[in-house]
Amino acid sequence: LKDDMPAIVFQKLTDLDNKRITSLLDPENAFLAEEDEDEVRKMEEAGYKVELEALYWLGPDYMGNWVVEMLKDAHERMFVK
């Protein structure tokens, strides 16, 4: 995605962001799903974040298609074993 969006949408992680990352990655934290841990680690390593609104740079269809894919994946995990 980084090549598809303007540099202005990427924001350096703040101290608060880093505290949240540390909290999420704590082994005692029950709120981070195992499949999301890799994404949080990548964000920590990159040192930047992209606000959700920045995805509109990719066009309105991008978010709609993403939601559809997420729902399909969730449906498959629930009903296809």
Image (spheres, grey):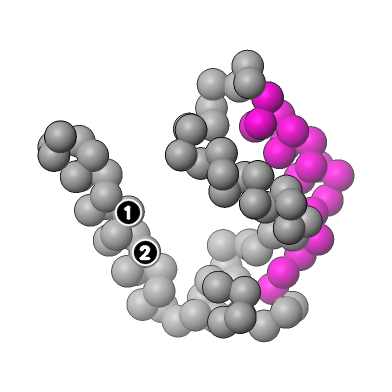
The C terminus sits in image quarter:
top left
Above or below, 77 against 4 in this view is above
Graded by Cα atoms within 10 Å as few (under 14), some (14 to 19) or many (20 or more), the crowding at tag 1 reads few
**Residue occupied by mark 1:** 70
Kind of residue at badge 2? Trp
Kind of residue at badge 1? Met
- Magenta range is 9-26
Q: Position of residue 56 (x, y in %)?
A: 51, 76
Q: Position of residue 20 (x, y in %)?
A: 72, 37
Above or below, 14 against 25 in this view is below
At x 63%, y 16%, the residue is: 28
**Residue occupied by mark 2:** 66
At x 56%, y 62%, the residue is: 52
- Of all residues, the one furthest to the top in this rendering is 28
Q: Position of residue 7 (x, y in %)?
A: 73, 79
**CA distance for labels 1 and 2:** 6 Å
Depth check, front residue: 16 or 39 = 39
Q: Which mark is residue 3?
A: none
66 displayed left or right of 5: left
Q: Is residue 17 magenta?
A: yes
Above or below, 27 against 35 in this view is above
- Of all residues, the one furthest to the right in this rendering is 15
Asked whether disc 1 touches disc 2, contact meaning CB atoms under 8 Å apart, the reply is yes
At x 46%, y 39%, the residue is: 35
Graded by Cα atoms within 10 Å as few (under 14), some (14 to 19) or many (20 or more), the crowding at tag 2 reads few
10 displayed left or right of 31: right
Q: Is residue 31 magenta?
A: no
At x 54%, y 31%, the residue is: 32
